[in-house]
Amino acid sequence: MKSLLCFIGFILSFIFSFSQNRFYVSDIVQGKIDSARYMSAITYIEGIEKVDIDTAWSLFPKKAYCYYKIGKNKEAKECLKIVEEEGYDTDLSEYLTMYYLIDVPKEKEELMERLIFAFEENEKKFFNRIKIFRKSDLKKFANFVDGYIAFLDEEDDKTIYNIIAAYFYYQAGENMNAYNKLSSFIDTDPTALSSFLMGIIKSEQREYLSAISYFNQAENLGDKTSDLYMNRAKTKGFNEDYFGAIEDLNIALKKNAKAEYYYLRGVCFNQVLRYKYALDDLNIAIDMCDTIAEYFNQRGIVFTNLGMHADALFEFQTAIKMNPNLEFINNNIGLAYEHNGQISKAIEHYKISIKKEPYYSDSFYNLGRLNYEREKYKTAIKYLEEAYLLNAKFGEITHYLGLCYAKTGKIEKACYYFQISIEAGCKSAINSQTEFCSEQVSEEEVID
C-alpha cells in the first residue's frame, strides 16, 4: 500500500512538473516573440522537440507565427497542419489559418465564415488579435472582405462585413477607408467599439465635437474602459474644454493609474492655471516613468509659468537629451535662456527651432521680438512677417510689426498693423495706436 501511494505521488508530481514546464517554456517563447527574436524562438522550440514532443507541439502555433513573421509561409503552413492534426489549436493558429486561406479561391466561403465566427464570438478580442498581422496583410484581409461584399445581393445586410472590413482597415492604418466603412452603418447599427473608433478618427480630423459625440455613444453602448475616457479627455483638451478633460482623466485614473494619464491631467491643470496640481501630477508621472521626454518638457513649461526659469531650463535640457527631435523643445529652451538673461543662447535656440519646425510661428515671433528690442527693425520685420503668415490670429505679432514700421518711419503701415492687432484682441496695441497714429487720424478728419 505504501509503495502504491509513493507511485501515485510520483505520477502526480510528474504531471504537475510537466504542466509547470509547459507554461515555463511557453513564457520563454513568448518573451522571444515580444522582443522580435523569431529565429531564436524557432530554434528553442526545435530543441524542445528532441526531448518533449507534446510540449513542442503545444508551441507550434507560436512557431507558425514566427515563420509567418520572417516570411517563411511554407514552414508556417506545415506547423499549422500539425497543430490541427494533433489538436493543439489556439486562437493564434486559427487567425494564421485564416490568413493562409485568402489566396485559396475555393475556400472563400470558409474564410468568410471563420471571420464572422471570430468576430461574433468576441468583437473586441477580434479587433485586438488581428494586430498580429503586418499592415500589408491587414489591407489584404480588408480587400478580401470588400471583394466578398461586391458579390452580395443588393438586398443583403452588409453591416457585419463592413464592420469587419473597417477593423482591418483601421489596424492597417488606412483610417480614411475605415471611416468610409464605419459611416455605412454607424448611424443605424453602431457598436461600442465602432463608435469608439469613429471618435478617434473624427478627433484626428479635428472634428472635435463630432468625436466627443461618438465617444459618448460608445460609453452609452457599454464602453467604460480607461482608454475611452483618456481619448475623450484628449479630444476635449483639443477643443479647449480642459475642465471636462480633467473629469474624464479622473475616471480613467480610478480605473487604471497610468503615468500617461497623470501626464495628460498635468497638461490640463497647467492650461487652467492650477500649477501646483499640474506639478503634482507631472511628478507622479515622472516617478512612474522617467524615460519620456514629453513629461520633463511639460514640467519645464509649468516651471516657466511659475517664473522658475532655472528649473525650467534644467527640465528642457533633460528632455532634449532624451529626445533631440522633441517638437518645440528648442523654442522652450530659448525662452528659458531668455528669461535667465542669456539672450545670445536664446537666439541660437530660436534659430534651431525655425530650421526644425518652420511651420511654428512662436520661434519667428520670439526672434522678431528680440530683434525689435535690439533695435534691429528690418531683421525683426522679416521674422514677424513670417510669424504673421503662420499665425494671423495672434495679436502680439502684428503689434510688434506695427512698432517696427513706426520706428522706421512707415507710419501708415504701422497704423495698419496696430488696427489688425487691436481686432485680434491685443490691448497694448491701443496705446501704440494712440501714440503713433493720432496725427494720421487728425489729417484724415481734415480731409473729410
Image: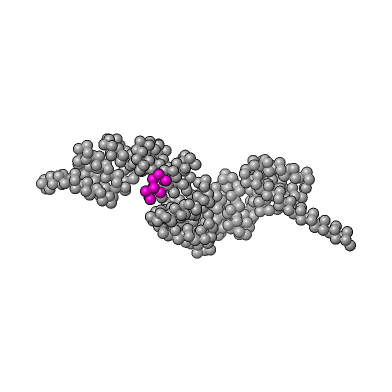
Which quarter of the image is occupied by the N terminus? bottom right
In the picture shown, does residue 379 fall above or below 5? above
Of 19 and 182, which appears nearest the observer?
19
Where residue 271 appears, as percent x and y from the top left, is 39, 54
Where residue 371 appears, as percent x and y from the top left, is 30, 37
145 on left or right of 377 = right
Kindly identify the residue that appears in the image at 60 percent across and 56 percent down.
125
In the picture shown, does residue 360 fall above or below 12? above
Kindly identify the residue that appears in the image at 27 percent across and 41 percent down.
401
Q: Main secondary structure of the magenta part?
A: helix
Q: Is residue 138 visible?
A: yes
Bounds of the magenta span?
Answer: 303-312
Of 170 and 373, which appears nearest the observer?
373
Where residue 59 appears, as percent x and y from the top left, is 71, 49
Q: Is residue 100 visible?
A: no
Of 115 and 440, which appears nearest the observer?
440
